[in-house]
């Protein structure tokens, strides 16, 4: 099955610009469905980015992060062709991970 | 309008060839590579996310007061086109930034997101947040052991007939 | 003061006279003249908007909204639907054929020619209709017209036509002309409890707010379709937009792809000829 994670990691000078879009409902647990039943909270809690085994960015998310969450950041010290590993875990214990090459 | 789409061929091959992520020990691996931070800081700040108002959320997350700083630049719209997806970002010229967090005061739980900035990472974050209604958005920047902030009111309106 | 008032009366009379004269002269529908008048109206009303920018709807009308949209376009919310659409489009049917077999140029870079008037069927054929026809011809069940797979497929096909100008043709066939005229009539007819016509919002008040939303100009309004709407938290097709719009003015929505909607799409697409396809798009 295709990963939920889409990532673009592009080297600009000595800085790698990273953008991520993740397919995830990020349900708040406050919304009712058509039948009037509450849709349970289902949201990514932690998202991490690792380069050369070292974490370069860690996100702690709550339910107020938008559906199909997006985040952008940048870090130094990488080279073209290096790998960037993106991983997340949600409140229901599901996880996903993707390794991308820095362009 | 020139948004690229789809993974590059290279990335597709990598995805296809990538080994299955071992779930056993995943939690440890997630927390592992944070040598500079105390172990306690790696935990998901569950308590802070449970707090209703901004002051309580900030207290639970950082446990200290914050001071407004013009070195923290918060970028958010005047009127959100849709409260479900509000693009909000921050940049700062403060040195030694270790953490950046976003608060939406009028949300059911004020803390929206918190980011850890290890050394070597640029102290800037862009994300998309949900806003329940017109509210102050507060961005907190932990730098050199002190806490700084910037605040902006973002209006959120009920959607009409649509454009 | 009196002289000025008298002068304004004269000017109005002359203008009305000119309109009446034009109307009398135009016993025959003249789509080309309509399209030019439509274009001129919006260009005159919004002299600061670059013509191609009209396809960006409310974002061509409001700077604060535009910034939010540009920010999100860096990694747009329709990304997943687009990817899914590409995959779906390339997946053969059970009988071994695929969507490419149903369309000119394998379905790549053709979206701007839809809808067209099918002289054999004697009706307007939209892209959505053509896709389901392709499915049914090849033994597959049709998709819902409003979202999900249909939105993904049309998103992909629109993407392959990005930048290509709308190129809608009205053949020299009285039935085609009639369909165009019906679409035009639908566009300008008031309906629903709110008694709005499409024109009430999109010709008379583009750039203005209705409740909290900024209205898009009618010209180029279909160019970004299908769209990811934050309001829907998902994708929607032209069918979805037409039906929800009818509901929002407290009218009774018609069936997706009904004659009226297809004729309306024919009219709206034709008068936007020359404007580039920008779909798939994102909207509030």
Image (spheres, coloured by chain):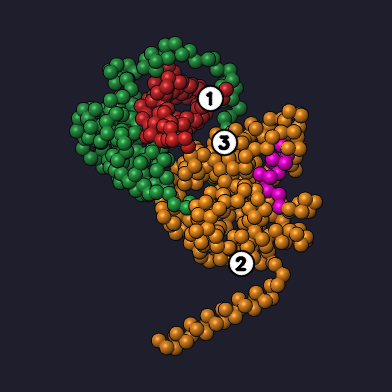
Give me the residue at 52% from left, 58% from top.
C192
Q: Which residue is mark 2?
A: C37
Q: Which residue is mark 3?
A: C81
**Chain of residue at mark 3:** C
Give me the residue at 67% from left, 62% from top.
C181
Chain A's colour is red
Give me the residue at 48% from left, 12% from top.
B22
Above or below C148: residue B28: above
The number of callouts visible is: 3
Question: Do pointers 2 and 3 mark residues of a single chain?
Answer: yes
- Judged from the image, the secondary structure of the residue bearing numbered disc 1 is loop
User: Label 2: how many residues lie within 10 Å, few (<14), some (14-19) or many (20+)?
Assistant: few
Above or below C238: residue C100: above
Question: Do pointers 3 and 1 mark residues of a single chain?
Answer: no
User: Label 1: how many residues lie within 10 Å, few (<14), some (14-19) or many (20+)?
Assistant: few
Q: Which residue is mark 1?
A: A3
Q: Nearer the viewer, residue B93 or C104?
A: C104
Q: Which chain is green?
A: B
- Judged from the image, the secondary structure of the residue bearing numbered disc 2 is helix
Give me the residue at 69% from left, 76% from top.
C25
What are the residue bounds of the magenta stretch? C124-135
Chain C's colour is orange
């Amino acid at each position: 099955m295709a990963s939920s994670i889409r990532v673009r990691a592009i080297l600009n000078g000595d800085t790698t610009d990273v953008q991520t879009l993740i397919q995830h409902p990020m349900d708040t647990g406050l919304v009712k469905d058509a039948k009037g039943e509450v849709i349970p909270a289902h949201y990514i809690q932690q998202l991490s980015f690792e380069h050369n085994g070292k974490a370069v960015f860690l996100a702690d998310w709550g339910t107020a992060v938008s559906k199909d969450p997006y985040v952008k950041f940048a870090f130094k010290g990488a080279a073209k062709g290096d790998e960037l590993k993106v991983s997340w875990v949600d409140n229901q214990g599901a996880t996903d991970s993707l390794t991308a090459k820095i362009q | 309008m020139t948004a690229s789409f789809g993974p590059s061929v290279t990335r597709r091959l990598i995805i296809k060839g990538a080994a299955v992520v071992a779930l056993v020990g995943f939690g440890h691996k997630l927390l592992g590579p944070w040598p500079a931070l105390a172990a306690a800081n790696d935990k998901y700040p569950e308590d802070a996310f449970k707090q209703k108002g901004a002051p309580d959320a900030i207290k639970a997350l950082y446990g200290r007061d914050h001071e407004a700083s013009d070195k923290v630049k918060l970028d958010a719209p005047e009127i959100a086109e849709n409260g479900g997806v509000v693009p909000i970002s921050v940049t700062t010229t403060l040195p030694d930034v270790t953490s950046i967090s976003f608060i939406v005061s009028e949300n059911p739980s004020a803390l929206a997101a918190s980011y850890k900035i290890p050394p070597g990472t640029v102290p800037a974050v862009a994300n998309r947040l949900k806003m329940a209604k017109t509210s102050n958005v507060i961005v907190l920047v932990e730098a050199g052991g002190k806490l700084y902030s910037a605040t902006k009111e973002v209006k959120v309106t009920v959607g009409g007939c649509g454009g | 003061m009196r002289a000025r008032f008298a002068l304004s009366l004269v000017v109005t009379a002359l203008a009305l006279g000119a309109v009446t004269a034009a109307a009398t002269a135009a016993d025959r529908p003249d789509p080309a003249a309509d399209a030019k008048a439509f274009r001129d109206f919006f260009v005159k009303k919004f002299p600061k908007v670059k013509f191609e920018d009209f396809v960006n709807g409310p974002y061509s009308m409001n700077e604060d909204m535009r910034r939010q949209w540009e920010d999100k376009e860096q990694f747009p919310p329709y990304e997943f639907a687009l990817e899914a659409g590409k995959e779906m489009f390339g997946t053969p049917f059970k009988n071994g054929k695929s969507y490419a077999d149903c369309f000119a140029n394998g379905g790549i870079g053709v979206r701007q020619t839809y809808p067209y008037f099918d002289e054999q069927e004697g009706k307007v054929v939209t892209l959505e209709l053509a896709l389901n026809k392709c499915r049914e011809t090849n033994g597959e069940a049709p998709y819902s017209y409003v979202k999900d797979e249909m939105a993904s497929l049309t998103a992909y096909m629109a993407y392959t036509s990005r930048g290509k100008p709308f190129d809608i043709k009205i053949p020299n066939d009285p039935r085609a002309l009639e369909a165009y005229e019906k679409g035009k009539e639908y566009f300008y007819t008031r309906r629903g409890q709110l008694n709005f016509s499409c024109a009430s919002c999109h010709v008379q008040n583009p750039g203005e707010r209705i409740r909290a939303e900024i209205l898009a100009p009618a010209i180029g309004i279909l160019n970004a379709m299908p769209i990811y709407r934050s309001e829907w938290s998902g994708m929607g097709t032209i069918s979805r937009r037409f039906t929800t719009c009818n509901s929002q003015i407290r009218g009774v929505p018609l069936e997706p792809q009904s004659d009226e909607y297809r004729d309306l799409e024919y009219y709206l697409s034709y008068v936007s000829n020359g404007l580039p396809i920008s779909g798939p798009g994102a909207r509030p």
